[in-house]
Amino acid sequence: MSFAKEPRSLRFEAAINSVENNRGRNPGRKISMAASLRAALFSVSYATLGIVATTETWAQTTTAQQGQGASQLPPVQITAPEARRHANTAPAQRADRAGPRRRSQVARRPEAQVAPKPFAESQDARTGTVGVYANSTSIATKTNTPLVNIPQSITVVTKDFIRDQGFQSLTEVTRYVPGVAIHQGEGNRDELVIRGVDSSANFFVNGFRDDVQYFRDLYNAQSVEILKGPSALTFGRSAGGGLVNRTLKEADGTRIYEATGQVGSWNDKRVTLDAGQAVNENVAVRFNAMYENSDTFRDYGHLERYGINPTVTLKPDDDTKIKLSYEFYHDFRLADRGNPSQGLPGGATRFNPTAPFAPRCVRPAPARRRGHASNGGGRPSLDRYRNDRQCISLVAILSRFCSMSL
């Protein structure tokens, strides 16, 4: 015979039922038995809770120990192939060896020098000149003024345009200026017709009158300005057609060393020199020179001219500037008026008449005329033109009190 064991819950219920039945039979005993049963139940409950709590604590402790053990595992290192390690090691070693060398080179490297302070603003920067274009000038108002603010027609021919075209005289420059025509000037001076008004005296240099009758050279010209229309209010005596001004190169501190040479037909020879720089932050110098010797396509035609122009600029402080300039210019040539000064041998012909171009000096000139310039047609050996010109200028600019040249 076999016995089946009832589950625990059924056994508890049977015990409770038996207790209830017994309590009905014996009340006093029933109460004591019930109290004993409740105490036993409470003990079992507390024991069960203690076992569950102990189990959870053991589980948490085990998990923490496992996590701590996992964190203490040694890190995994992956090593690259042998060939790659060698390839990467050599540059690293060279870089390590080059590190101290670079540091030593940096230590020995001299400190960057501070750029020297410019002497002054250059002429091109002051007038906004770029190539053949100029934005301002001081010829019309005596102060540096933009061209758009000057209510007068002005043409500015820059030094770059003069150099590119190879100009050597004002006659050649004014061929490119509208409203200006060229006059012969009797073969011994510059003479222009500006807006229909003929004048040989309306020439200026750096704003000062230069009405001596001679051929002007452009070896030391920074620019040439042609001012059209009446200008007596600014320049005093002046023709109604206009005037021409030459702005000379000045010692503005720009470092320049330039020499040119020229040869051509009829034994033409010409050399020029332009040299200048800043001596220090208070002094700048510049020197321009020229020499030319040439014959012409006409018999007896010959010219020789030369000139020197040293300039010095002193700058005691930022508000004061003193410019000193000296120029000596020599010009000796045959006064060629365009007509023959000698009659044809054997007399005149129908197609080449002598009159009215017959020479007025058919005999040797008297001693008092020999070696002097002759305004009339005479012997070529005596009809010479010579000009020796010297010019000394002193310009002081006091920017603290005014911006006008004195």
Image (cartoon, rainbow, N blue to C red):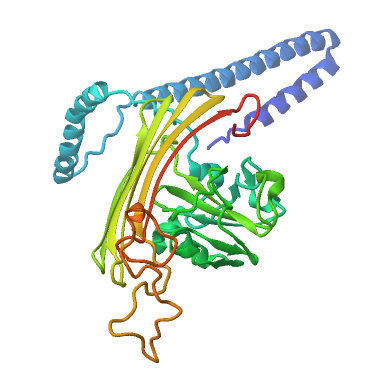
Instruction: In this rendered view, identify the residue nearer to me: 255 or 297.
Output: 297
Asked where in the image residue 286 lies, by quadrant, the reply is top left
Residue 370 position (above or below residue 187): above
Residue 80 position in % (x across, y down): 21, 42
Q: What residue do we see at 21% from left, 22% from top?
A: 104
Using the rendered view, name the quadrant where residue 199 is placed. bottom right
The residue drawn where x is 29% and y is 34% is: 76
Question: Image height check: is 22 above or below 2?
Answer: above
- Estimate the x, y position of residue 94 in percent, counting from the top left: 16, 34
Classify the position of the C terminus by image quarter.
top right
In this view, which residue lies farthest toward the bottom? Answer: 350
- As drawn, 190 above or below 43: below
Q: Is residue 227 visible?
A: no
Q: Position of residue 65 (x, y in %)?
A: 42, 21
**What number of labels is visible?**
0
Could you say which is closer to the camera, residue 193 or residue 269?
Answer: 193
Residue 123 located left or right of residue 294? right
Residue 61 horizontal side relative to residue 306, left or right: right
**Image coordinates for residue 268, horizontal then vertical, percent:** 26, 63
The one of 51 and 1 positioned closer to us in this rendering: 51
Where is 396 relative to 134, above or below?
above
For the question of whether residue 21 can be seen, the reply is yes
**Residue 28 found in image quarter:** top right
Residue at x 30%, y 64% (from the top left corner): 364
Relative placement, left or right, of 187 versus 128 is left
Viewer-closest of 43 and 184: 184
